[in-house]
Amino acid sequence: MKAITVSEESRDADNLKLELKTTEVPSIKDNECLVKISASGINPSDVKALLGKMPNLTWPRVPGRDYSGVVVEGPSNLIGKEVWGTGGDLGMSKDGAHAEFNIIDIEGIREKPKNISMLEAGSIGVSWTCAWLGMVTGAKVTRGETVVVFGANGKVGEAAIQIATAQGASVIGFERNRNDYCGHTNEPLEIINLKKEPDIYRAIMDRTNGRGADIIMNTVGSPYFGAACNSMAKQGRQIIISTIVEENLINLRTFYRGNNHMIGVSNMDHDNIVSGELLENMKSGFEAGLYKPYPIKNKNIYSLKDAKEAYEVVLKDLCRDRIVIVPTK
């Protein structure tokens, strides 16, 4: 089979060290399935791994955390199933899906939603499980709450908006320099352009009658952390999934008097089995039309032989749309 292989750390985005190799199709064990990969999205964590910046990373390794495909070997009841998946282990401590075939634990095998394509299913996992862990598992978003999302048009931001509005929450989205929201939502939302309205605290308080936000999904981290801490309602929760600066100050008196909560989210500790359970939890939302997959444009579909170019696009942030590898292309 053909697979992208990384054997050593790359210096930077202009010097990515990866090879397209032809190897034997891997053999499965009793607790595994062999999946023929249909599509595999490229996530920032996939390309950061090439730079040696991810935990639990071992080399040589085939990258690729997200996937969709068809089970071709394993228990007879699973053969032919169209599946989707992701995992913090895939592409890190075990081979991932930027290949023609990949081995997945039987317990991690989950059928994709029937109403979305293989292309769409293969680009959902990382960002949606991250948003789910924050909004549902961590913050337990409920109807009537006010949710603020920093980075509304980012992939985790969009997933968080879909999840929140499906639960009946109202959403205020923040963007660095744009006025519109490009994704799906189940309820109307307002986008605040920070270039035009830079006072985050005032923007939130003005729109919540001085109450503050019940949940803040902070997909950016440190640039908005202080303002977010000051803008939470009583019992408010701030979800942190990333940061630029590691050490940040917080007013502890404001924090404890507000009975506030800080929720850290990383799906790197969730292997393909646990991640499969998360995808199963959200499957009905996709099939009911409450959740919509990211649209995949033809120009953003790459073959294995063009993987290096695709990785560079993601690593250099040259495109905000989903980039997908299709091994048969």
Image: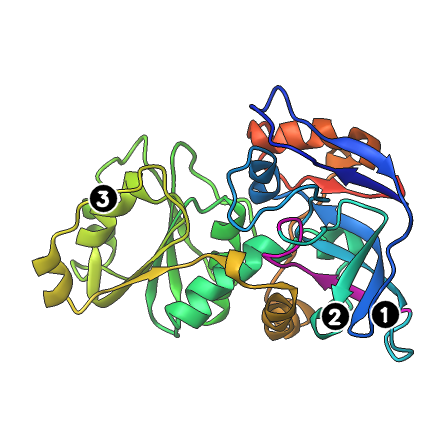
Q: Nearer the viewer, residue 286 or 51?
A: 51
Whether 104 is drawn above or below 30: the answer is above
79 sits left or right of 56 in the view = right
**Is the C-beta separation of discs 1 and 3 under 8 Å?**
no
Q: Between disc 2 and disc 3, whose residue precedes?
A: 2
Q: Which residue is the site of mark 1?
A: 81
Q: CA distance from mark 1 to mark 3?
A: 47 Å
Q: What is the three-letter code of the residue carrying label 1? A: Lys
Q: Which residue is the site of mark 2?
A: 109
What kind of element bears circle 1? Answer: loop
Q: Quadrant of residue 314?
A: top right
Residue at the image position 70 percent from the left and 36 percent from the top: 6
**Is the C-beta separation of discs 2 and 1 under 8 Å?**
yes
**Relative image position of residue 53 (x, y in whole percent):** 51, 38
Q: Between disc 1 and disc 3, whose residue precedes?
A: 1
Q: CA distance from mark 2 to mark 1?
A: 9 Å
Label 1 environment density (alpha carbons within 10 Å; few <14, some 14–19, many ≥20): some
Residue at the image position 26 percent from the left and 46 percent from the top: 225
Q: Quadrant of residue 195?
A: top left
Q: Is residue 90 magenta?
A: yes
Which quadrant: the N terminus?
top right
Q: Which residue is the site of mark 3?
A: 248
Which contiguous range is marked in magenta?
80-92
Residue 294 in view, yes or no: yes
Whether 317 is drawn above or below 120: the answer is above
**Relative image position of residue 99 (x, y in whole percent):** 81, 46
Q: Is residue 261 magenta?
A: no
Q: What is the three-letter code of the residue carrying label 3? A: Asn
Q: Between disc 2 and disc 1, whose residue precedes?
A: 1
Mark 1 against mark 3, which lies toward the viewer?
A: 3
Residue at the image position 60 percent from the left and 63 percent from the top: 271
Residue at the image position 83 percent from the left and 31 percent from the top: 305
